[in-house]
Amino acid sequence: MKKILHGITKNFSFLLTGQIVYKIFAFFTYILIARYLGIAGFGQFSFIVSFIGLFAILTDFGLNELLIRDVAGQLGELSQKYISNILSIKLILTIISFLFIISASLLIGEVKETRVAILIFGLCLIQDSFTIFFRSVFRLFEKMEFEALSLIVEAILKFSFVFIAFKFLGKGLLIVALIFFITALTTVISTTLFVVFRFVKLKLEFDYVLVLNLLKKAIPFSFLAFFGVINFKIVTVMISLFKGDVYTGLFSAANRLIEPVIIIPVIMSTALFPVISSLYRESQHKAIDLFKRSSKILFLASVVIVVIINIFAGRIMLFVFGREYSDSIVSLRILSFSLIPFFFKFFLERFILVLNKPRIIITSYIGSVLITVIGGFLLMKFIGYIGSIVALVLSEFFIIFYNFASIKEIRNA
């Protein structure tokens, strides 16, 4: 038992370290990009990244999580079969995704530079898809130190390349796109080599029956992965299409300041998920009691952080992004209220998964997307791009209220 606990602690520590280092370097990387490209350039960059991110569901399709769920603890022939077949599926899905991206670039990118940038970031998405899949192989073998190393290498390379390029090569959207492409290529090659030489042989297989079964079982995972971050990407795309690059840049600057804070509830929910799962099997009362106490802590923490952000929003924005982004202070204040539902969301979702009710999460996400799109479109007509941010915050609160109401209904049934 001690050996198992030691392994869990070690892997969690590696993963936590890797994620923190990755987030820190990513934060400073985007600050550099925002400062060097300016508001309009940063807005254009943010639009392309968010737009390309909408295709992530097709390249991933929840297969990474499915691999871990179905094969964990059964390494050998089964793991090899799953990995080989999933690799074939991902190859097909990425080709289809890139064809969609090419079509979209012709429809959306009116400027040649924008079209080229969309295609380059599309190639980054494909490479990142395989990188993330190989990282799931590390998790499968319970060797999170390799995932942490891969994350840290990617983050440091991206930051270093951006810094060097802007200092010596000049500024521009295509420069950023090429940096991301080179980083993605380097990361996927190094991650692939780790997998091949330390864990499993990579080969393509296509077992028709297994492939259909995998795709069917992966649907719930794909929904959760996609809808978990979709609202922010939708708002970025909507602001860009209806209000232009400048307002997209203002929203994106506020969003980048909010993102690092989200790691707090993510870490807490990751740490508590196995504990609550275990407790629920022993005693539902104890699991629910822990859930309530943890929820109170998360709520208080989120309120304190929101208050601090609203008090110091001006100083934070000017210090991090500069006076050019002073109009983004209002966006930051409003967007900060999304942290309250966000602090609950990850933890609440995992508790619902313990109850084995994933449909609740999927339904709440579908409702939130409708609020984001319809509400954002209507509110933008009255209060400008701020309206889409208000709709985003309301959509995140909807997820929490719907999930809490559903849990209460289950308990009363």
Image (cartoon, helix red, strand yellow):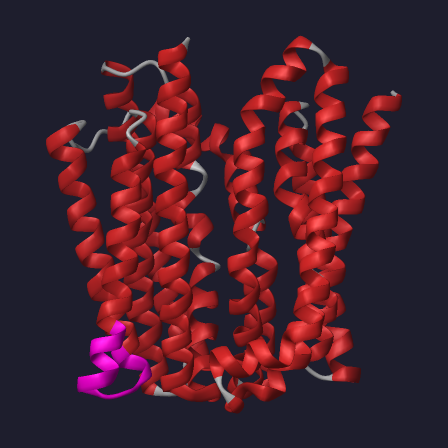
The answer to which image quadrant residue 42 occupies is bottom left
Which sits in the foreground, 12 or 361?
12
Horizontal relation, residue 210 to residue 304: left or right: left
Q: Is residue 121 above or below residue 91?
A: below
**Residue 192, image x and y in percent?**
18, 42
Residue at 53% over, 35% down: 270
**Residue 249, image x and y in percent?**
52, 81
Q: Residue furthest bottom?
A: 324
Residue at 64% over, 16% down: 279
Q: Is residue 405 above or below residue 168?
A: above
Horizontal relation, residue 342 to residue 172: left or right: right
Q: Residue furthest left?
A: 197
The span shown in magenta is 162-175
User: Is residue 71 visible in the rendered structure shown here?
Assistant: no
Asked if residue 172 is among those painted magenta in the image, a careful observer would answer yes
Residue at 46% over, 49% down: 57
**Residue 29, image x and y in percent?**
36, 69
The answer to which image quadrant residue 255 occupies is bottom right
Which sits in the foreground, 373 or 281?
281
**Residue 85, image x and y in percent?**
28, 30
Asked if residue 412 is among those painted magenta in the image, a careful observer would answer no
